[in-house]
Amino acid sequence: MPLPFEIVNAAVRRGPFRAVVFDFDGTLSLVREGWAFLMAELGRDHLAERQLIREPESDLLTYLEREMLLLSGKPSIFQMRRLAEEVTARGGVAPDAEALLEEFLRRLFAKIETRLAGLRSGAAKPADWCVPGSHDLLDNLQRRGVKLYLASGTDRGFVESDMKLLDLERYFGPRVYAPANNTPNFSKGDVIAMILRDEGISGDHLLGFGDGYSETVEVKRIGGVSVGVASTEPSVAGLNAMKRDMLIGLGADVIVPDYREQAALIKWLWA
């Protein structure tokens, strides 16, 4: 009987693990799902204003969205700088990255406010805006006595607020790391190095879950095992093909669309 997830690296080390690090947006939370496409639209709009679009709009949006995903895990100012670079590369005068970030956040909050309002009022349940199976997965890992860490490129204030609404605080306690006020020197690599040091473990005892570049590359760099989460918005069933291809290219060992089959996944990872 085939396993209900995709094994990319059949030779991957299979547990036990002593610590697990999670990304946040797209890996546990879906409140901000669609952020990369919003960034792509922002870049498109600035290129259109300068008459710098030379390809079909759909191709441009796909290209820009992938560029944004490749910077996921870093503070959002990095994506804004990348959009500014694209304008320059096409012969235009680059917009200010800070101004781009303000506009992106305005668009993002306009998109997600109804989601947050539903969670605040109780009209929506935490599970409605988490990657399906997230709470079951975290419960499973806690029962195994594994220390759980969270490392996010999203501003810390937003992460903490969303975690409360999504009933995720209880799993991580103080082990939450994110940039304060989009400080550009935040590094998931530094967080992972701290985890190994504090837990007194080698990299092969670390398991990582993420849907983006930074966490996948950093977990693999230290010899850990990476589960790539090719998540989609709640209204879209199945696997995000763009994320899947990117995560495989980055070295993810296993690919899942969500955690509906978390019991089988964890049983397999722990061999």
Image: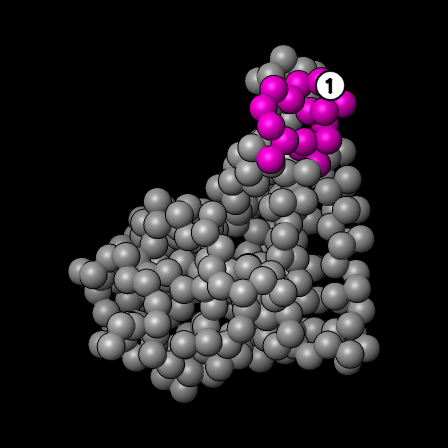
Quarter that holds the N terminus? bottom left
Q: Is residue 215 above or below residue 209?
A: above
In this view, which residue lies farthest toward the top?
A: 91
Q: Which residue is mark 1?
A: 50
Question: How many numbered discs?
Answer: 1
Q: Is residue 45 magenta?
A: yes
On the rendered structure, is 143 left or right of 15? right
Residue 161, given in percent of the width and then of the height, sits at: 70, 66
Residue at (69% x, 59% y) in the render: 158
Q: Is residue 270 above or below residue 64?
A: below
Say what secondary structure mark 1 lies in: loop
Residue 27, given in percent of the width and then of the height, sits at: 51, 62
Residue 51, given in percent of the width and then of the height, sits at: 71, 18
On the rendered structure, is 107 left or right of 126? right
Query: Which span of residues is magenta-colored?
Result: 42-58
Residue at (64% x, 50% y) in the render: 35
Residue at (73% x, 31% y) in the render: 45
Residue at (24% x, 57% y) in the render: 9
- Viewer-proximal residue among 249 and 53: 53
